[in-house]
Amino acid sequence: MSVRLNENKEIVAKIKEGLKKKDGYCPCRLQKLPEYKCICEEFKQQMADPDFEGYCHCKLYYKSKD
């Protein structure tokens, strides 16, 4: 398993800007809940799933199986 940033630098820049504005909480979600603090709980669970391959909710990170 490997996790990397999205290769699209524009998306990464926008999400990082949003993270700064929301104190590290996912900018794609309305509420500031502990489970939405980046790296969010949803993606942590997806990272733990050996069969999951894909992006996190906001498309900042990508998990590959290799």
Image (spheres, rainbow, N blue to C red):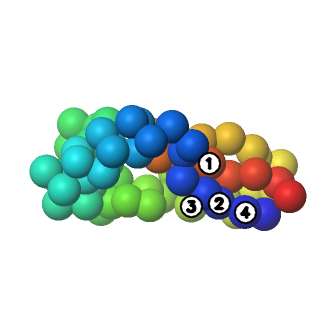
Q: Residues within 10 Å of mark 2 (few under 14, many from 20)?
A: some
Q: Label 1 to label 4, Cα distance in Å?
A: 8 Å
The numbered mark at residue 62 is 1
Q: Residues within 10 Å of mark 4 (few under 14, many from 20)?
A: few
Q: Label 1 to label 3, Cα distance in Å?
A: 12 Å
Closer to us: mark 1 or mark 3? 1
- Residues under numbered marks 1 and 2 in contact, where contact means CB atoms less than 8 Å apart: yes
Residue shown at the point (23%, 45%) measured from the top left: 18
Q: Which mark sits nearer the N-terminus, 3 or 4?
A: 4
Residue beneath label 4, please? 2
Tag 3: residue type? Lys
Q: Indicate the secondary structure of the residue bearing disc 4.
A: strand
- Residues under numbered marks 3 and 4 in contact, where contact means CB atoms less than 8 Å apart: no
- In the picture, residue 54 is in which quadrant? top right
Q: Which mark sits nearer the N-terminus, 3 or 2?
A: 2
Front residue of 20/29: it is 20
Q: Label 1 to label 2, Cα distance in Å?
A: 6 Å
Q: Residues within 10 Å of mark 3 (few under 14, many from 20)?
A: few
Residue beneath label 3, please? 44
- Residues under numbered marks 4 and 2 in contact, where contact means CB atoms less than 8 Å apart: yes
Residue 20 seen from this side: yes
Query: Measured from the top left, where is residue 51 in percent x and y?
Result: 83, 49
Closer to us: mark 3 or mark 4? 4
Query: Measured from the top left, where is residue 3 in percent x and y?
Result: 65, 60
Q: Indicate the secondary structure of the residue bearing disc 1.
A: strand
